[in-house]
Image (cartoon, rainbow, N blue to C red):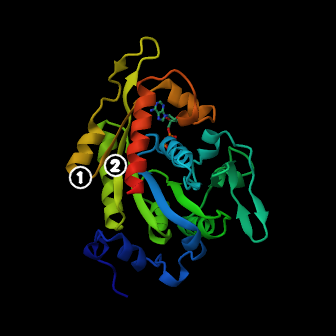
Amino acid sequence: MAKKTEKDQQCSGDCNSCASSQGNSTPASSLPERSKATIKHVILVLSGKGGVGKSTVSVNLSYALANQGYYVGLLDLDMHGPNIPKMLGIENARLQYMGDKIEPVHITGNLSTISMAFLLPDRDTPIIWRGPMKMAAIRQFLDDVNWGPLDFLVVDLPPGTGDEALTIAQIAPNVRGAVVVTTPQEVATLDSRKAVKFIEKMGIPVLGIIENMSGMICPHCGKEIDLFGSGGGKRAAEELKVPFLGAIPIDPEMRKAGDEGHPFIIRRGEKNQTWESVDQVMEALVRVIEG
Ligand code: ADP
């Protein structure tokens, strides 16, 4: 058999055909069928880098949509670092089976979630899986979970454009679009551009870019400190010609909300700039999603 030349191995830029050529293709006949009927819209949340606030955005967006009366599922596909249960304060929840279906963990009457973390014996156990196992798990999370009729399934992805992002982009039904979260500094926005290009190559609408950790509100004086800078996400959105959904500052209250399992959007406290920016970003995102 002829050895592949370097030219043969070059990326064509077509993720769909590339995955097919490596035996990872998903024939239409094996697409998750059940979820097509039960999930109206899938929304992907991506980032180029880790730690930029993707899970934070996923959790707050899920609540924002649920607060509008929609039925929402939150699927934690960050298999190697599943933090959604911690951020929702349901770390000790475990999955139950109802017949041949997995019951998601219900957070409110119209918000439920699934995470790999619910399947692990304890929080220190790592997932050591190759691509095909992840692909099988993603398929199960779509089709074998008793999501019930959902208006939206928000999918929190791991950073980058690896197996999980490629699989969900290829097999999820009714993908409404994807949102990219970035922090303002160049090392992050550079990677967020790759995430945007990936979404476009997959033929998925880019709902927009959110700039998180944009400036910092000093907990002592309440004024803004330019910690990671600001404006990088906005510039990237302008250059890539995709919507800019707004900026959220660094605020210790945001970090506390995550650590204490009580999402920022439902925390009651003194209204400040962070409150307003989270509200504005979520409203902008919900508007784009509602189309
Ligand atoms: P990712 O999902 O991209 O890895 P996370 O959402 O887990 O990022 O956020 C990383 C950490 O930063 C978490 O501890 C989270 O609570 C915190 N965080 C996220 N956004 C902010 C913010 N705007 N201000 C302060 N802390 C934040």
Residue at 45 percent across and 65 percent down: it is 175
Q: Position of residue 87 (x, y in %)?
A: 60, 39
Q: Alpha carbon of mark 2 to alpha carbon of mark 1: how far?
A: 10 Å
Q: Which is nearer the eye, 117 or 267? A: 267
The residue pinned by badge 1 equals 240
Image quadrant containing the C terminus: bottom left
Residue at 41 percent across and 55 percent down: it is 289
Which residue, as the protein is rendered here, is positioned at the far top?
A: 221
Report whether 230 appears left or right of 138. Answer: left
Q: Which is nearer the eye, 258 or 164? A: 258
Residue at 46 percent across and 57 percent down: it is 43
The residue pinned by badge 2 equals 192
Which residue, as the protein is rendered here, is positioned at the far left?
A: 239
Structural crowding at the residue carrying mark 1, measured as other residues with C-alpha within 10 Å and reported as few (<14), some (14–19) or many (≥20): few
Q: Position of residue 18 (x, y in %)?
A: 37, 74
Report whether 217 appears left or right of 75. Answer: left
From this view, report whether residue 242 is shown above or below residue 123.
Answer: below
Report whether 194 appears left or right of 220. Answer: left
Q: Position of residue 172 (x, y in %)?
A: 50, 68
From this view, report whether residue 256 is shown above or below residue 71.
Answer: above
Query: Within the image, what quadrant is residue 236 found in?
Result: top left
Q: Which one is in front in this view, the residue at disc 2 or the one at disc 1?
A: 1
Amino acid bearing label 2: Ser
Query: Within the image, what quadrant is residue 50 found in?
Result: top left
Mark 2 and ligand 1: say if the CB distance to the nearest ligand atom is below 8 Å: no
Image quadrant containing the N terminus: bottom left
Residue 24 at least partly seen = yes
Q: Earlier in the sequence, mark 2 or mark 1?
A: 2
Amino acid bearing label 1: Leu
Secondary-structure class at tag 2: helix
